[in-house]
């Protein structure tokens, strides 16, 4: 499981620090303009519109907005507009639509609905111009650059970075703004971490649980998807607070669990759940030193609980790309998938 630049996926993982730096350098004016628009709106709520990895980026931003701006954030099903034709009452809110291609008809339809309703609508996309950008009042190019691998990596990360940069401007949170500015350096360090020990314990497992809480739950969702895409292994993400509500029933001896914890208020609870699952016979690896029984994985501490969670995705991406190849898969060509998915 040595590092390689052989696959498109690995090349694009390696580009993440540079892509984030490019976005932060070139989009200062856009961050300020959208942040000012949100301050002027003073929304009562925020909704997100996305699917797949983009929806995991939206989930990360949900927690970041709720923790920082203290506003409720909800993910809205795009089919409400594209299939059911519902005109939601979103005029008092803000809407964030995320799509790498900016083409998916259902995402565009709901963004148009939000804009018509009077919401402050914002498109985060890697493609300008695009139908999604045209559907929103504000659009922000995430500047990830061409992404050829089917599995989104740098576009996922840059979508989150763009959202966090706007959030920092919107709320005037200077600590978050500094933490976001430091992300390219932290990403470079995180991409050098080695999580291959998890593969040794997972062996020929057919199913994996990925746990998290808060922003790290969004990383857990993204990790579970990448396990499916890149390795063909069934994986599910759960909040560490929810795993005992049913999912624990199939956890037994040698069941692999990846527990993702940031240095935030939820870290101890994730560590305690990791220990409980080890007691049930599971193989648990955790990004924390607070667990007494689970095996610790290396991590990068950023000094801010929100950006600390985001850096967890870098060593995971490196790990899952290498594990995919070691299991005889091509991470650039997942079964039955294509790069751009357009749903209605």
Image (tube, rainbow, N blue to C red):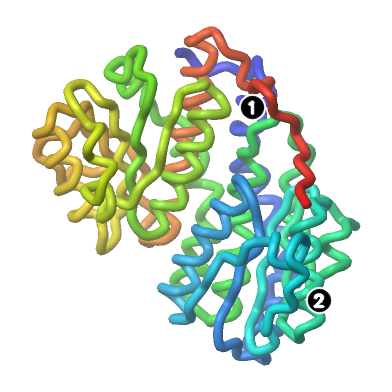
At a point 86% along the width and 55% down the height, the residue shown is 128
Mark 1 crowdedness (10 Å alpha carbons): few <14, some 14-19, many ≥20 = many
246 on left or right of 304: left
Distance between the alpha carbons at the discs numbered 2 and 1: 33 Å
Mark 1 secondary-structure assignment: helix
At a point 45% along the width and 28% down the height, the residue shown is 234
Name the N-terminal-most of marks 2 and 1. 1
Q: Is residue 305 above or below residue 94?
A: above
Q: Is residue 179 above or below residue 69?
A: above
Q: Which mark is residue 144?
A: none
The residue where tag 1 is placed is: 9
Q: Which mark is residue 137?
A: 2
Residue 167: in sight, yes or no?
yes
Mark 2 secondary-structure assignment: loop
At a point 72% along the width and 53% down the height, the residue shown is 99
Residue 324 rendering spot, x and y as whole percentages: 52, 18
């Amino acid at each position: 499981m040595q590092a390689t630049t052989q696959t498109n996926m690995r090349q694009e993982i390696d580009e993440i620090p540079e892509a984030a730096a490019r976005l932060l350098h070139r989009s200062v004016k856009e961050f300020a303009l959208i942040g000012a628009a949100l301050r002027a709106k003073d929304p009562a709520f925020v909704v997100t519109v996305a699917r797949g990895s983009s929806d995991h980026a939206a989930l990360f931003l949900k927690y970041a907005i709720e923790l920082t701006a203290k506003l409720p954030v909800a993910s809205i099903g795009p089919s409400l507009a594209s299939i059911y034709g519902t005109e939601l009452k979103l005029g008092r809110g803000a809407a964030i639509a995320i799509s790498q291609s900016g083409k998916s008809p259902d995402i565009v339809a709901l963004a148009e609905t939000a804009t018509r309703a009077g919401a402050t609508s914002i498109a985060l996309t890697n493609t300008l111009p695009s139908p999604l950008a045209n559907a929103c009042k504000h659009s922000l190019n995430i500047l990830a650059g061409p992404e050829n691998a089917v599995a989104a990596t740098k576009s996922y990360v840059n979508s989150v970075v763009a959202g966090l940069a706007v959030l920092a401007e919107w709320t005037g949170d200077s600590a978050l703004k500094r933490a976001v500015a430091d992300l390219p350096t932290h990403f470079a360090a995180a991409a050098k971490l080695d999580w291959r020990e998890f593969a040794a314990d997972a062996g020929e497992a057919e199913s994996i649980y990925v746990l998290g809480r808060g922003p790290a739950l969004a990383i857990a969702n993204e990790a579970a998807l990448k396990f499916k895409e890149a390795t063909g292994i069934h994986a599910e993400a759960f909040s560490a607070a929810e795993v005992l509500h049913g999912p624990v029933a199939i956890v037994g001896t040698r069941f692999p669990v990846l527990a993702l914890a940031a240095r935030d208020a939820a870290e101890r609870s994730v560590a305690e759940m990791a220990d409980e699952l080890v007691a049930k016979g599971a193989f648990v690896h955790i990004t924390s030193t607070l667990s007494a029984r689970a095996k610790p994985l290396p991590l990068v501490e950023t000094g801010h609980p929100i950006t600390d969670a985001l850096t967890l995705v870098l060593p995971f991406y490196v790990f899952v790309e290498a594990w995919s190849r070691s299991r005889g898969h091509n991470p650039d060509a997942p079964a039955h998938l294509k790069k751009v998915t357009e749903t209605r």
